[in-house]
Image (cartoon, rainbow, N blue to C red):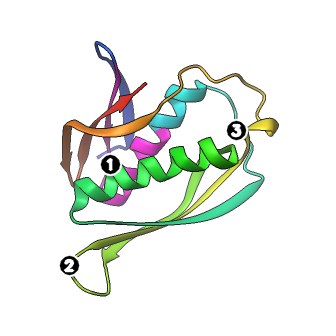
Amino acid sequence: MAKGFLVVDHVADVRIKAWGEGFADVFSQVAKGMWSVMFGEAQIPAIDRWHIEVTGIDMEDLLIAFLNEQLVLFDTDGLVMAHIEELTIEAGPDGEELRLEAVLCGAPVSQVDANINVQIKAATFHGLELTPTEAWVTFDV
């Protein structure tokens, strides 16, 4: 199965369908789609790397936390993702939560030669659908 994402028109928000070969691929494709909505086809330089770690009570919660953590980094530190270098999902130390660790590559927004197309406020649980090979995620804009 190929990997990818598709941005779907939605009444007041933006909705993305993403697919891949397992949760890590799907999570990566949703993130790629989110940044594509925000910056279009702009070439984001991969001049910085940063590590993020989020937890969730289930895969859906983990996906939303992963996406919203990236939006926080954009809003607070001005970081824009070019690609995901590493992404792992595993059970947390207590066995009751899931843990995602990722290394993202990108640049400060000041180094990006593009204007933001759409400001995404948050990834939401509204209409969220997630399987190991596909996701539908709605973003509040």
Locate the C terminus by quadrant. top left
Q: Position of residue 111 (x, y in %)?
A: 81, 38
Give the CA distance from mark 3 to mark 1. Answer: 22 Å
Amino acid at dot 3:
Ile
Q: Position of residue 86 (x, y in %)?
A: 52, 65
Q: Which residue is mark 2?
A: 96
Magenta stretch encompasses residue 30:
yes
Magenta stretch encompasses residue 54:
no
In the structure shown, which secondary structural element does the residue marked by tag 3 occupy?
loop
Question: Is residue 28 visible to the viewer in this orientation of the structure?
Answer: no
Numbered mark located on residue 20 in the image: 1
The residues colored magenta run 13-32
Say whether marks 1 and 2 touch (CB < 8 Å): no
- Relative to 6, is 22 above or below? below
Which residue sits at x=45%, y=35%? 33
Callout 3 environment at 10 Å: few (<14), some (14 to 19), or many (20+)?
Answer: many
Q: Position of residue 51 (x, y in %)?
A: 59, 66
Give the CA distance from mark 3 to mark 2. Answer: 37 Å
Which of labels 1 and 2 is toward the front? Answer: 2
Which residue sits at x=38%, y=34%? 5
The numbered mark, 3 or 2, whose residue comes first in the sequence reads 3
Task: Residue 30: name its quadrant.
Answer: top left
Amino acid at dot 2:
Glu
Q: Position of residue 93 (x, y in %)?
A: 32, 87
**Does residue 94 appear to the left or right of 24 in the view shown?**
left
Q: Residue furthest top?
A: 11
**Does residue 86 appear to the left or right of 47 in the view shown?**
left
Say whether marks 3 and 1 touch (CB < 8 Å): no
Which of labels 3 and 2 is toward the front? Answer: 2
